[in-house]
Image: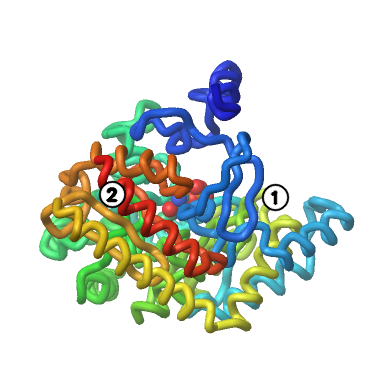
Amino acid sequence: MSTSATLFSRAQQSIPGGVNSPVRAFKSVGGTPVFMEKAKGAYLYDADGKQYIDYIASWGPMILGHAFEPVVEAIREYAGYGTSFGAPTELEIKMAELIKSMTPNVDLIRMVSSGTEACMSAVRLARGYTSRNKIVKFEGCYHGHADSFLVKAGSGLATFDIQTVPGVTAGVSNDTLTCAYNDLVGLQELVATNKGQIAAIIIEPVAGNMGCILPQPGFLESIRKICDAEGIVFIFDEVMTGFRLAPGGAQERLGIDADLVTYGKVIGAGMPVGAFGGKKEIMDMIAPVGKVYQAGTLSGNPIAMIAGYTLLTELQHNSSIYQELEDKTQYLKNGLDAALKNWGKPYVINQLGSMISVHFSGHAVTDFATAAAANNQLFSQFFHALLDRGVYLPPSAFESWFLNNALTKEDLDQTIAAVKESLETL
Ligand code: PMP
C-alpha cells in the first residue's frame, strides 16, 4: 500500500472525505489522491517520494514555480516579526499601491483571505451600490463557495454533478440568474426580463473552472456595453487570470474595463489571500467609509502580504516572464496537438496565455454544455495514465491547467512524451 493510500484512509477518519477541499479527493477520476510532501520549482514530491511535473500550480498562484526563493526568504524574515497584529501595517499600503500600479481600474482595493470572500464581498458591494438584489453569473463559472454562487457552478460542483446545494436557501438562489458562457442573446434576454433589478454581472473573463474556455470575440465588450446601458456593475473575477494572463490580468490582456475586480491566491503567492477592488465611487461604499460592511481579522495578514508583495514585485520587474510563459504553453500545446492528432480520436485544446486544457470532444468547447458533453471518462483515464508517468494534471476535466515559469523545455518534452505513451493506453 502506498503512503498516500495509508494517509487517505487515515484522513477519512477525521476529515470529511479525507480532504479539506472536495476536488482533491479524486472522486470523479477515481483512485487515491496523492498526498504531497514538498514542492520545488516545477515539481511536486509526494509522500512516497515520487516526483511529478506540476500543471496545477496550486490552482494558479505558483506562476514562478514552487518555493520561489525570494518568497520563501521573505516569509522566513517576516515570520520573526509576528504573524498577525489585528492592526494596520505599512505593508498593506505597499501591497495596495503595487496592485494599483499593475492593474487597470483599481482606485481602491481591500484585502481579504480567499477568492470566495473577495467575490462574495464584491457582490455585496455591487448590491449596496445599486440598491438591486439580483446578480448574473455564467454556467460553469466558479466564484467560490458563497451561497449566491452555488448555482450552476463549475469546478467541484460540475465535477461532482451537484445541481442544487442543500443549505443554500431558495431565496438566495433565486437572486442568482444564470446564462450560458458566450451566449450574448441569452444574456440580453435575461437583462431585459429583469430590467432594473440586476446589481452585477460577474464573470471569469477567461473561464478556468470548466476546463479553459475563452470568451468569444466581442462577448466581454458586449457585456461591458450592457452594464453601461443598464447601470449594472461589471465584476471581473480574476482569481485565476489576475497577474497570470498579464501583469494587469484579463483586463489588460483583453482590453476590457471592469467596474470591480476580484483577486485570489495569486496575490498571496499561495498564502491564503484574496482582494476586491475597483472604482473609487463604488469602493467608497465599503465600511468604514460607507455602510456596506465587510471585515476580517486576518485580512492583510503580514506574512501573506510579504509573500504576495515579493511575488508581484518580481512579476512587475521582470515582464519577460509573460512571454516566456506564453512560449512554453504554446510549445506544450503544439506537442499535445501533434500527439492527439496522431492518436486519431476527437479532441479540443483551448488555450490563452498560460491557461490550457484538453477536452475529448469532436465539437468546439465554448461553454459548460459543450464541456460537459465531452468524454470526461476518457479524461479520467488520461489523467491517471499521466499521473502514473509523473505528470500531475488537475483531477477533473472541469479545471484549467496552469503552467509555471520554472518548467523547462525538458519538462515539457517529458510531458509530451508521457502524453504520447498515455494516449496509447486509452
Ligand atoms: N473565483 C475563481 C475564478 C476561482 O477559480 C476560485 C477558486 N479556484 C475562487 C473564485 C474561489 O477562491 P478560493 O478557493 O480561494 O475561495
Left or right of 184? Residue 56 is right
Provide the secondary structure element on which disc 1 rests. Answer: loop
Residue 270, visible in the rendered structure: yes
Residue 383 image-quadrant placement: top left
Residue that lies at the very extreme toward the right in this rendered image: 80
Q: Residues within 10 Å of mark 1 (few under 14, many from 20)?
A: some
Which residue corresponds to mark 1? Answer: 298
Q: Residues within 10 Å of mark 2 (few under 14, many from 20)?
A: many
Sequence-first tag of 2 and 1 = 2
- Residue at the spot of label 2: 140
Residue 246 spot, x, y in % from top left: 46, 76
Question: Which corner quadrant holds the C terminus?
Answer: top left
Up-down: is 338 above or below 12?
below
Left or right: 361 in relation to 21: left
Circle 2 or circle 1, nearest the eye: 2
- Amino acid type, callout 1: Leu
**Residue 315: quarter of image:** bottom right
The answer to which of 68 and 224 lies nearer the viewer is 68
Q: Is residue 307 left or right of residue 150?
A: right
